[in-house]
Image: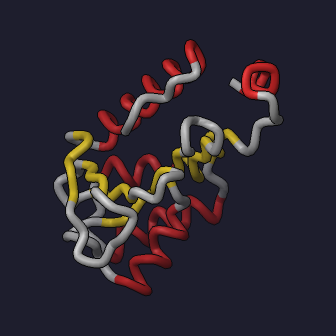
Amino acid sequence: MTGEFEHRHGYPPGTNQVRPADHDDQAAARALAQVTPTPADLVTFYENIGDVTWADVGNGYFLDPASDVLLRLQEYGVVADGLVIGSNGGGLIYVAGPDGAVYRTRTASLDEPEFDKVADDLRHFLELLERLLTRFNANGDPGYL
């Protein structure tokens, strides 16, 4: 994606990466599994992936590291019975529900949030992100997730 980015858009790309989990990320994933009813696939994800940062895909897409998910949980508790796992650059927030489904806020606020289900489980959500990146690479249109 970044090879053609500057030519296509007229400015250099920002951070666009899927960062593998390091030891600290894996420890945070294990801690997350201990303190909440975290879906097993989310724990597995965080044991392997540190975070996802696609700053230049549309407004941006971000899946936070497990340590940030834990910190947010400690500070604010669960959101709509789920865990805040990321956001897009437009401020909409992604929440993993206890059933494994992924939801997106309708607004950029967690004050009295309303949610839309965007994926049945984390695998489905990651597949949607992959399609979004593929579409963005092909024609510059990231679509909407």
Q: Residue at x 79, y 21 (%)?
A: 3
Residue 77 found in image quarter: bottom left
- In the rendered image of this protein, does residue 132 appear above or below residue 20? above
Q: Is residue 24 left or right of residue 62?
A: right
Q: Residue at x 40, y 56 (%)?
A: 92
Looking at the image, residue 117 sits to the left or right of residue 41; the answer is left
Residue 32 to residue 52: above or below? below
Residue 118 higher or lower than 132, as above or below: below
Coordinates of residue 30 in the picture (x, y in percent): 45, 65
Image quadrant containing the N terminus: top right
Q: Residue at x 27, y 72 (%)?
A: 79
Name the residue furthest top. 138
**Image quadrant assignment for residue 123:** top left
Counting from the top left corner in percent of width and height, residue 82 is at: 26, 66
Residue at 55%, 60% in the rendered image: 65
Q: Quadrant of the C terminus?
A: top left
Q: Nearer the viewer, residue 98 or 118?
A: 118
Q: Residue furthest front?
A: 10
- Residue 144: image location, x then y, percent: 39, 35
Q: Is residue 136 left or right of residue 114?
A: right
**Residue 137 occupies quadrant:** top right
Q: How many marks?
A: 0
Nearest the eye: 108 or 72: 108
Residue situated in front as seen by the camera: 114 or 69 = 114
Say which of 41 and 135 sits in front.
135
